[in-house]
Amino acid sequence: MKAARLGIEEVTCSDTISHLPDDLLFRILSLVPVRIALSTSLLSKRWNYVRKMMPTLVYDETCPYNGSLGFDQFCRMSLPLHEAPVLKTLNIKLGEYSDSIDILLFPNIRSILLEIIITLNYHQVFYSPIRFPNNLKVFKTLLVLKLEGRIAVDVVDSPVCFPSLKILHLTRVRFQYKEESFKRVLSACPVLEDLYLQRLCSHGRFVFTISVPTLQRLSIDTESVYHCYDDLRFEINTPSLNNLKINDRGGCFNFVEDMPKLVEANISLLESETGKLMKVLTYFRALQHLSLRLSPSILASHLKGTLISKRILHLELHIYDTIQLSLLTHLLEEYPKLRSLKLNQNHWFPKRGIEDQPRSVPECLSFHLETLEWIGYAGTLEENEVATYILKNAHCLKTATISLYLTDTEKRMLIEKELRSMTKGSCQLVILLLDY
């Protein structure tokens, strides 16, 4: 098209972006808030069509806006204008307290909705209520629901509200009527497979009852705070679970029923709860991947003589004290089939000195270990001793990845040379430098 005339020369501008395929334009507009995407409808009929058929909508209250409508009213008026038969994702980013966003939002969704993300991270005392009634058609097709921040959740007219929901993430939310609301939320999801719960460190007693026969993946996390004063208990009944992740050093856990399908577990608990958990883990007949944040001495004492360690193929240890060869070899003796070992080293405690070499080599080193990963290697005498022992005796080792905890260039080069001299020709050694 002809756009302007400069002197006697005519300048021609090509509208390249309008000729892009719909899928690419959808992707571009999905990266900006709806208020901005709506303005593109003024460009042409083509853009008006693209705006109406977008598969992803982002409503961002923190986005600058000069209009007269408030955010709640803007959501209520603009959502019915969306004409796509399927809305893949509706992403709501709230910036202020609202007591009516759910009433204005959910009844005005016309499309088949697959995913809702609602985030509210303003710094105020009050929590915005989000209520989910079961009489709305929009919830019948929902597959993913993610709520985060200062939201008070409740499901009204239970039991079934989300008959198709597979994934539920609840990050630092409150529950409107405490334990009763939490129970109602889970009972409204009869086919739930993935539950992520990052709980608040609240004062008082709270029992999380997680009884979901269809659940396959469960992650429980605690918000990062220095002090957590509460009495939190978890009653877990999930017979179909195959992946368990717990990072909670304040809660008490009770597993009501065995989990015969559990394959992978990543555990970080208070040491006072470790014995109870280990006793439960011995009944997980399919467990192969185990990640634990415990000292090797405590882990070895709890797992000694148990059947669980005989089945583990992949082990990850987060070590919070000086690594000792005697303890590590004692621990590896309990894992005869181990194929992969990951050590995550934290240098918080003083060194202890060199020990005598073990009299026998663990079976996993002689016959099975193929992969070693060590994060936080600093080249201390104790660590050097352990590295030398593993690299010398792991006859089937194929890959060793060692991330160095060092800033001194000269010392790093010396340690790299030492590690390469220890490594057999059949093993690929990868040396990385940790970011600080």
Image (cartoon, rainbow, N blue to C red):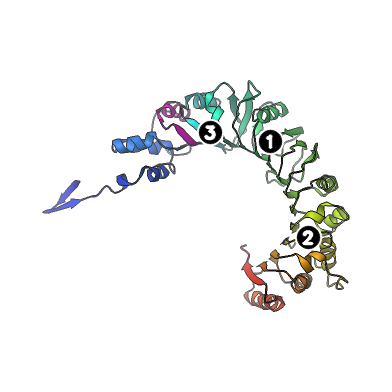
- Verify whether residue 368 appears in magenta: no
Q: Is residue 323 visible?
A: no
Callout 1 secondary element:
loop
Q: Which residue is drawn at the image coordinates 72% and 48% (left, top)?
A: 263
Q: Quadrant of the C terminus?
A: bottom right
- Looking at the image, which is closer to me, 378 or 308? 308
Q: Give the number of the disc on residue 337.
A: 2
Residue 260: horizontal and vertical position, in percent? 77, 43
C-alpha span from label 2 to label 1: 30 Å
Callout 3 secondary element:
loop
- Verify whether residue 84 appears in magenta: yes
Residue type pointed to by label 2: Lys
* Disc on the earlier residue, 3 or 1: 3
Q: Is residue 285 above or below residue 369?
A: above
Residue 245: horizontal and vertical position, in percent? 71, 46
Residue 56: horizontal and vertical position, in percent? 46, 38
Q: Which residue is mark 3?
A: 96
C-alpha span from label 3 to label 2: 54 Å
Residue type pointed to by label 1: Thr
Q: Is residue 29 above or below residue 400?
A: above
Which callout, 3 or 1, points to the residue nearer the camera? 1
Callout 2 secondary element:
loop
- Range drawn in magenta: 69-90
Q: Give the number of the disc on residue 214.
A: 1
* Disc on the earlier residue, 3 or 2: 3
Tell me if label 3 and label 1 are in contact, CB under 8 Å: no
Instruction: Specify the quadrant of the image occupied by residue 131.
Output: top right
Quick one: which residue is furthest to the left in this view? 8
